[in-house]
Image (cartoon, helix red, strand yellow):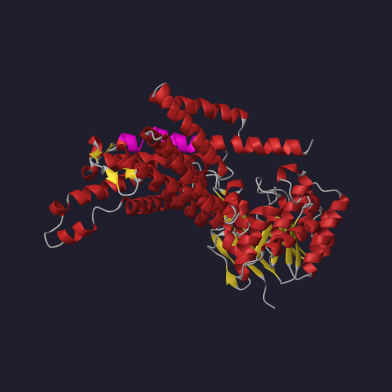
Amino acid sequence: MSALLQVRGISKRFGGFVALDGINLDVQPGERLGLIGPNGSGKSTLVNCICGTLQNEVGTVHFDGQAMDGLAAHQRTHRGLSRSFQLPRPFASLSLADNLKIPMFYTVHKRSGTPLHADNIDARCAELLRLVGLAAKAHHRPRDLTQVEMRKLELARAMAAEPKLLIADEAMAGLSQSEISEILALLKRLNESGITIILIEHIMSAVMSFSQRLVVLVTGKKIADGKPEAVVRDPEVVRAYIGE
Amino acid sequence: MRTPLFALCALAVAALVFFALRLIGNEYYFVAGYTIVQYIVLATAWNILGGYTGYVNFGSAAFFAVGAYSSVALITFANSIDDLLPESVAPLAHSIFPLPLGVMVVIGGLVSGVVGYGMGYLTLRLRGAFFAIATLALAVVLQTLVVNWDFVGGSSGAYVIRPDSVPLVGSYVQYLFILMLLMAVVAVTIARTIEHSKLGYGFAAIRDDELAAEASGVPTLQLKLIATALSGALMGMAGAPFPYFIGFLQPQSAFGLEYAVNSIAMPMIGGTMSWVGPLIGAILLGTVQQVANVTISSAVNLLIVGLLLIGFVIVAPNGIVGLVQDWTRARRKP
């Protein structure tokens, strides 16, 4: 089976600082991948390079059999790559329901080629908001939300694009244990419906219970890739996190 | 309300305004009215880029002037066909020129739209203040070009002789007023249609967060180019009849500061989030300016704009429309 996402030798520099150094990564269709690493290890930069928010200077990204290099972020989204941002970036002047309409209008609509009916869009918005527990606030503005709700909105918006691969960038930071379980259950349900998921997270219990495979980045290099239980026992990973 | 119905209603209102002014019978009201309605077009056009997508354009006067000077170029060309063209082609050119004003409006709009598209292509990778500065620079560059272009009069300006009367309407000023009213109907209808369309959602996403818009699949550059081209085209259309209105066009008047300032101030005062805002702002501010013109002096205009703008930024940052929305929301909650 060929990989859904194929990252080959990606490097990214910011001036003299090497943020990513020759990263290789394969993600199989339907997989649940955890991506961890200390702060500043390049996780978000990797996501940005995969999604086109940043363009990598070296290396290639293939998604669903197509080369992504040089494509703008929106073109990658159209092809089925969707991500949430680490710091929520809602559309502040639009209601929650309208926030979700943007990916529906511009990605789902474009991909299917047939215009979505207004009723379908409204129904889908309501369904997504219900999934993340924001149904009651559908007509509120993002400024009325708490940080936690903002993260849920961020996730819902990424889901609204109906992706093949969803990258959740620290969707759970600051959430309570019960909320984490809620989001994890939601992500697992999504995964069961056929969506491949990359979860970037600091909360180890969440990553461990979610991931089928774990990848560790440290200072822009991939130092481990394998079964979660094996990876967390890897001496190099332990050294990176805890020190000598 | 569906777009055709809205356009019909807007046309009806425009007709009402025209006949009401005709009842009053004072020709000066058409002169003042023309200026106010022209600002409706300019403010609405500015708002398509500045209000909907959040890109502040300080170069409105340049787009207005591009429209005005395309007309001057066409008029000058029509007057000098015999000097410019060989004898064999001249009769053909004479049969086409001088062009009807309506055609010149379309041409002015097209030229200005192309300039807008070009400017967008060059500058839209800039954000915030940098984009604003680039638009200001564009205005300076274009003014320098016009000042040094002798064909359209250069720095000394160009006389445009307007016909005394027009069939059916009568006076030429009334004819210009009707034309501008029609343009205002077109501009407001376009703005309102965008607002309720997929395009409007895309613009709003760009205004709120461009990175998130891209990640949601919005082709931001493409949409911003649509906005600059459309906004520029509408401003150029508003400028195209201006040489006939003023009779003598100089670069200083076409590139006047008041166009740049008013087309920003009017949407700001009215409210930038909807088509109603620029309309209210232009009518309100335009009327105040016209009254001040007659009662105090024309020099006090920009002072009024400045003071009002400061007042609104402090009291009602979302403009009159925002103020009303807040008020109705507060009443609903008790």
**Residue nearest the observer in this picture, A11 or A158:** A158
Position of the C terminus of chain B, as image quadrant, is top right
The secondary structure making up most of the magenta span is helix
Give the residue at the far top of this rendering: B296
**Residue nearest the observer in this picture, B73 or B298:** B298
Measuring from the top left, give residue A207's x and y in whole percent: 81, 58
B289 to B159, vertically: above or below: above
Measuring from the top left, give residue A194's x and y in whole percent: 75, 71
Magenta span of residues:
B252-265
Measuring from the top left, give residue A209's x and y in whole percent: 85, 61
Q: Is residue A176 left or right of residue B131?
A: right
**Residue nearest the observer in this picture, A120 or A4:** A120
* Residue B106 lies in quadrant: bottom left
Task: Examine the structure image and report whether residue B258 is included in the region drawn in magenta.
Answer: yes
Query: Can residue B127 be seen in the rendering of this structure?
Result: no
Query: Can residue A83 be seen in the rendering of this structure?
Result: yes
B170 to A55, vertically: above or below: above
